[in-house]
Amino acid sequence: MNHRRQAVRGLAAALAALVALTAAGCSSKAKTGDGKVTGAGGVKTGEGVTDKTIALGALTDMTGVYATLGKSVTQAQQLYVKQVNAAGGICGRQLELTVRDHGYDPQKALAAYTELEPKVVGYTQFIGSPFVAAVKSRVDGQDKGLVLPQAWSASLLGSPYIRVLGATYDVETINAVDFLVTEKGLKKGDKLGHVYFEGDYGENALAGSKHAAGKAGLTVVEQKIKPTDNDMSAQVAALKQAGVKAVVISAGPRQAASLVGVAAATGLRVPVVGNNSAFAPQLLGTQAGPALEKMYWFASPSLPIGADTPTAKKLVADYQAAYPGDGLDNGIVAGWTAASVFGEALKKACADKDLTREGVDKALLTMKAHDAGFGMTHDLGDPEAPSSRESVIIQPDKSVPGGMRTVRQPFVSEAAKSYTP
Amino acid sequence: MSETLTRPVVRGRALVYGWSAAGLLLAALPFYLDRFWLQAGLFAMAAALGAIGINLLTGATGQLSMGHAFFLAVGAYGYCAFAGDGSDGLAGLGLPGWLAAVLAVALAGLAGGVFSPIAGRLRGAYLGIATLALIFIGQHVLFNAHDVTGGYNGRAVPPLSLFGLTFDDTELLVAQVPFGAVEKLWYLGLVLLVGGVLFARGVLRGRPGRAMNAIRDHRIAAGVMGIPVARYRAAVFVLSSMYAGLAGVLLALVFQRTVPEYFGMALSLEYLAMIVIGGLGSVAGAVAGGVFVSLLPQLLTRYSDALPLVSAPGTGGIAPGEAARYLYGAAVVAVVLFLPGGLVRLAARTRKTPTSDRPSGEAR
Amino acid sequence: MSTFAEFLINGVSLGSIYALIALGFVVIFRATEVVNFAHASLLLAGGYVTAVLHDTIGFWPALLAGVAGAAVVGAAVEFLVMRRHRGGDHSVLAIVTIGVDILLATELTRRIGTDILALGDPWGDAVVTVGPVTIAETRIAALLAAALLITAFLLAFRYTSWGVAMRAAAENQETAALMGIRLGRVSLGAWAVAGGLAAVAALFLTVFPTPGLERATSLAALKAFPAAILGGLDSTTGALVGGLLVGITESLATGYQGDLTFLGRGIGDVAPYLVMVAVLLIRPAGLFGTKELARV
């Protein structure tokens, strides 16, 4: 095999030449300095920041299972960026938001994160908690860019760079159960049905309902479902047989609609509360609409989009002007809140003359009472805790913009205050 | 192999130079490309390995399998379970990385072997849909067996160590270029892929390959001619699962986390699309198809701003993810209708014309 | 006991919908020996047409349009794609239908976007209560419609010339062709019928108790795979029995999941596949499928 020896020899020689070349600095990847420079206005800058622009990333899902959420969140954040830029930008620099749609596919999500990582300061949005978990070690280890995931699972807490905005699902569920006990007549010894998704959304919420049930002397009847289940007849029949006095649902909007519709039709007339992901205004146009308005409430980490605050009113007007024909939902609030938190952190970092990732992370930790204009203040000082434990209880109502009416203003239940995951 | 011997020496030398140039190029890439491209390349290598496996089974032996993703999952999770040290609260044996990888591949083969009695009884469509059951049952287990799989959020993948080199993100300076996980894994991926390709070619070009094709073309005739059909079918199933397991291990190392969501039906369908696009029954076809199908969506997403018809997310119009799906759906249909034999046949056709006329044409 | 009856009736009505889908699947397989993985998209197409049109032309015309639309899509797939590759390897053709499915599903989900479309059916959320058992009217309608369609289909299969042609083609394609049966028409007809049946199934999969038609609706069609297989891919009776079996298994496994926790929660979706594997172990060609006899 003379050829082979020849080939090996050739390969070795070429490799040696290559190493020599890169050693001489021919590869742009070769290490030169730490990439941090002091730019315009005496501000220290790093990845994603030039004298003219600050680059941000959004990893969203606009073609997969969370398309409804992804679209609203992304459009709200694009609107935020547009408005900030129109007002002169931040630190004399224009914001640039690069959106990558991963369609809830792990491979694309990871590819998109990797692609944007060297180019942006941080991410205003990252949908899909499994994917956030997948990059966690890289974020904590070397990347250190701020990530604001659009998921409220307690499993995401604990990293100084990945920050959950608003109450996590467990805390939210505790508050929701408190609402059932204090206002809907649920009492000690009653049974509480809980229909939940497999996965950390549902399981995190279940931890909350169990905690709350323990405090209030209730028994939880569990029903686990999958995101592909759309017909809740069997679950309702099982809950009816168990004799539940109220139901918590930690699933998607479709499951909530089916559950409430079937319960109303088959005579299981008990209050149903959901988590913030278990409602979409589109539902009011379906068969289950009337039943939803009658016996369904859901908890949310912020006031609804139709709230009576100046920010909400302005946001609704601007959003409808920018995206006529698109519905209003709480994804807009979530997207706007995240973008405004990121923007605020950038402003503070600018004041400290440090727009590097470390500077932004540090600035974020000093934000102890950020008000995004939706009735909540967010305390970002403690990475171990959600930025707020407050929830709002909302009732579907066709007559209000966005289809949502606040029935209980921001509150933290006693059980939620003492809760640690 | 006899054709290589009778070929003119000039042609052989040209081939050697061609391959070493290609090899050199691939070996040089980690020094120049950034992480995104290397990662995309690694995904493509893993896809190519998996596609070789399913091509042995479906392409060469004619057994339709929709359960390939399940065996990838066995490899990926198997590696985590063997290599994990239990520090994250999940079951782990704490074995050295290389041993865990070998065992994970063996485990995938074993899973294939356990399923093969069922597979042996079924044919054609029945087998295809029975293997679909593997996906659903497998994912159910992945979501529910929390102690081993970590449930919905999956589990972290312990980095591989080989000869004192750890394939993780601790920086290693090679000629002043910082080598992180993907740069190091790139070489591992290359070695595995080359090994996988050579082995599969050996299988297909030798006696077993002819037996497999005979089984595909006429099972009963093959049996009459003395080929132990049942044993061959079971063996191919095991081998194909081992390739899938190997792809799974490589994917897990690149992902740094295994997520149950990934190993669904869509992934199985993607693998079938790969072998049809690349070329059924051919190793080169599997590699070509794997690279095509796994790179396409990533390229379209990255260049969504610059491409006509494809629009950036949030602006309406066709999103890059959708464009990729249109393209590869259409590719599957078009290849079967207009290019039976897949991409490799296309390559073979364009290459054959000049070389058959002038054998020394390439060595000018 | 009443809960059990409720689960059972729900299961039977769900099963009758699955039977409709599985029947279309079997029809295509009998006529062309191709496993149609694009069936889910045919279903989505039918549902989509109905959902878009019901506001302007009323529910019943819209339903007819949906059935016709899905039949046209099915026939178009046969005419434009499958026919161009006749005589090829059947597993290759099965993979082609995967390609077709990707194309159709991407287009339809892009059109549906993030909406949940109502189909405007006349039953609404009305329920019927018989003693302790409550059941949705839509479920009863589904059961009746499925029974009617399946009976009509079986009669047509037996007595019309189309049915005879199809059975002859399924028996032996070459002989049938020699006897003057136009195979192209038979397979075109099979695809169209399968599309129409899927459109009816789409209606009943998206009315109450489910909220409406949306992008994930087609996933429900996957349940028809185990149904068709465990009944026997080439048996129309098998499709019926398989559909019912899958529906009942799913309904009972979901309903009693509280008592089945040792299998992991959410077993309802997996149970049909477990039953299918068990059946295949005993009868490799399904319950009613014909065992393949081959000559060398």
Image: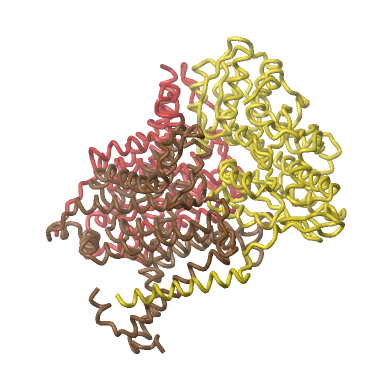
Chain colours: A yellow, B brown, C red
Q: Residue at x 75, y 30 (%)?
A: A405
Q: Position of residue B56 (x, y in %)?
A: 31, 58
Q: Does any portion of residue A214 appear in the rendered image?
A: yes
Q: Specify the quadrant of the image occupied by residue A252.
A: top right
Q: Residue at x 30, y 63 (%)?
A: C182
Seen from the viewer's position, the closer of residues B23 and C140 is B23
B215 vs C83, left or right, is left
Placement of C186 over or under C5, stated as above or below? below
Q: Position of residue B314 (x, y in %)?
A: 68, 54
Residue at far top of view: A189
Q: Residue at x 41, y 30 (%)?
A: C11
Q: Residue at x 53, y 26 (%)?
A: C127
Q: Specify the quadrant of the image occupied by residue C172.
A: bottom left
Quadrant of the drawing holding the C terminus of chain C: bottom left
Count how many numbered circles sit on residues in the image.
0
Seen from the viewer's position, the closer of residues B308 and B362 is B362
Q: Position of residue A299 (x, y in %)?
A: 69, 28
Q: Position of residue A197 (x, y in %)?
A: 54, 33
Q: Does any portion of residue C42 appear in the rendered image?
A: no
Quadrant of the drawing holding the N terminus of chain C: top left
Seen from the viewer's position, the closer of residues A4 and A313 is A4
Placement of B203 over or under B14, stated as above or below? above
B38 vs B1, left or right, is right
Q: Specify the quadrant of the image occupied by residue C249.
A: top left
Placement of B290 over or under C131, stated as above or below? below
